[in-house]
Each structure stands twice: as C-alpha cells, then as structure tokens.
Amino acid sequence: METATVVRDAEEVVSRSAGMPSRPGRGASSFACMSTSDVRAQSEASPSSVKTLARGLEILQLFSEDDPELSQSDIASRCGLPMPTVHRLVGTLVGHGFLEPVAGGRNLRLGSTLLQLAGPLIARSDPTVVIRPKLHELSNQSGETTNLAMLLGPWVVYLDGVTGSRMLTPQATIGARISAHNTALGKALLAQLDDAEVKERIGEGPYHRTTKRTAADWPELKKRLDEVRKTGISISDEEYEIGLTSIAIALPPQSDGTLRGINISLPLSRATEEFRVTAIAMLRDVAAAVSAR
C-alpha cells in the first residue's frame, strides 16, 4: 500500500475517533475550511478531541536537537502509547505537514508546517533589523560564531546566527532548540526570572546531564544562576558539550516579555582569559546598544 493511502486512512480513523471531520480530498483546504464556531462545536461535542490534540502535541515535543529523527517505535516507547494509536496520530501529523518521513528510512522529523507557524514568532523577535548586524560585527571582531536565541519554556530556541571564520567552529541551526539549564544562553535567560518561575519551567531536577559539568539539580543550578545575576554574564565551559565554550548575555526583554540573548561560541582551546575579557566587553556593548534603541 502506498504511503499516501496509509496517511489518508490513518487520518480518517483519527478524525472519527476524535470527533473531527475527515480530511477533505485533494484540492480542498483542510482545517482552514472550518469556522471557529465549527471547531468549538466539535470540541464541545467530542471531549476526546482534546485528548487527541494533547497526544499529538506531546509527540511533536519529543523532537529536539538531540533527537531530530524518531521512529514510531521510539514515539510509542516515550509516550507510553500503543503502536496502533501512534500510527494513527503520526498519520494525521504527516498529513498536515507537522511531521515528515525521512527519505530512505522509517524515521520521522519535524515538517515544514512548523516552520510556517514559527514565522510570526521569529518575526516578532525582529532579529534582522537591529541585532543581525551586531551579530556580524561580533563575529568579525572575534572570528567566532555568534548566535541570537530566545527562551521558550524550558528550551533555548535559536533565532539567528553568524558562523565564525575559523576552520574549527561550532554552528547552530536556526529554529533548533536545546535545553536551557546547561547552556550559557539558557542560564543567561533563566537568570532573568525569579527562582520560582525557573523551577516552574525546568523543575528541580535531577536534570539531564550531557557532560560531567552539567548542573545535576536545583541547588547546583541556582548557584550558577546567582552568579549570572551578579555579573550579568553567563559562561558555559563544557556544560553542554565536551570541548565547547559559550559566553552569553541577556538582551533587554521585549515589550511582550520575550527573553532573548546573544552568545559567542567557540572551542574551549581558544577561550583564553584574554579572549574572555574581550568577548565579555563586546557582548556588553551590544546589549547596551540594543537597550538604547
């Protein structure tokens, strides 16, 4: 049976079980054809649709920079759902572009629909008009990679970046998300919140450790956040990845409360004391320039 047929059949099953209308045929729009009142009526008539939606969102949240591809078996194991249920949910997510099959295998990855939805979010942060020239300036002066990111729940999401000119240099993918508790950018942004909100976002541990230098629990992380609050600068020496150093600073919050920060990322071997002093001064200058606008 061809993949398209499987997807359509799976969507029909999910739609019926969730109390949602079947997906229209080729050439017709999907959920766009439903009015707000139609959606509300469907939800009120079929409470199971809320549960189905929650499961679909849970599946999407499994994908990250560490796990960009997952199989249906991986999803079933992590969500604790039976394979037939996962197959139906994945079918709907694939059908609407939230997931897409990886060519040549059985794995799945996030689809293009998410990029379309992320467009307004990224545009709201306005990285190009004000900050992108500063990222280029930082990268040119330091020779290293610079990034702009925002805090989204317990994650850091990369919004923009300029790759350094050195042969060996780290590079982040725009739109990628990484954990906040063990990264310089994450600590710089978490430090802007009070302790209660930080714990609400990431819990009190134990935290996932990517290296031996990752903070394992809340008391250890709190010490690091307090240091960031005192100095205004966040540094990660191999907390996220062996051999990687990152120096970050938070930018002034946006009018809607969105927290953003910038960093300079480089191999630990090049992060000399002299470089750190210079990098911190450059980061402070950028933050001050953004604040003055």
Image (cartoon, rainbow, N blue to C red):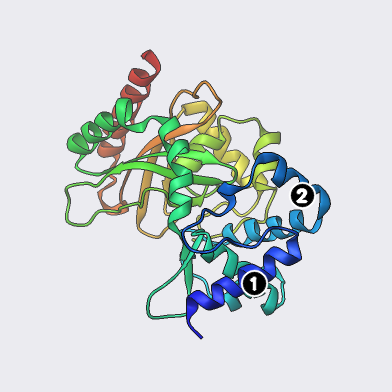
> Vertical placement of 194 versus 172: above or below?
above
Which class describes the residues within 10 Å of circle 2: few (<14), some (14-19), or many (20+)? some
| Camera-nearest residue between 147 and 207 | 147
> In the image, what residue occupies the spot 27% across and 29% down?
134
Which class describes the residues within 10 Å of circle 1: few (<14), some (14-19), or many (20+)? many
> In the image, what residue occupies the spot 67% across and 79% down?
83
Any part of residue 201 in sight: yes
Mark 1–mark 2 CB contact (< 8 Å): no
Q: Earlier in the sequence, mark 1 or mark 2?
A: 2
Q: Residue 193 lies in what quarter of the image?
A: top right
Q: Would residue 149 appear left or right of 79 to someone viewing this image?
A: left
Provide residue 91's location: percent of width, then percent of height. Answer: 58, 70
Identify the amino acid type marked 2.
Ser
| Camera-nearest residue between 251 and 73 | 73
Any part of residue 184 in sight: no
Provide residue 178's location: percent of width, then percent of height. Answer: 48, 52
**Circle 2 SS class:** helix
> In the image, what residue occupies the spot 40% across and 60% down?
242
> Vertical placement of 78 versus 163: above or below?
below
| Camera-nearest residue between 230 and 175 | 175
**Circle 1 SS class:** helix
> In the image, what residue occupies the spot 32% across and 25% down?
130
Identify the amino acid type marked 1.
Arg
Q: Where residue 43 is drawn, which disc sits there?
A: 2
Q: Which residue is mark 1?
A: 88
Tell me how far mark 1 sits from mark 2, CA to CA: 19 Å
Q: Would residue 30 appear left or right of 37 to someone viewing this image?
A: left
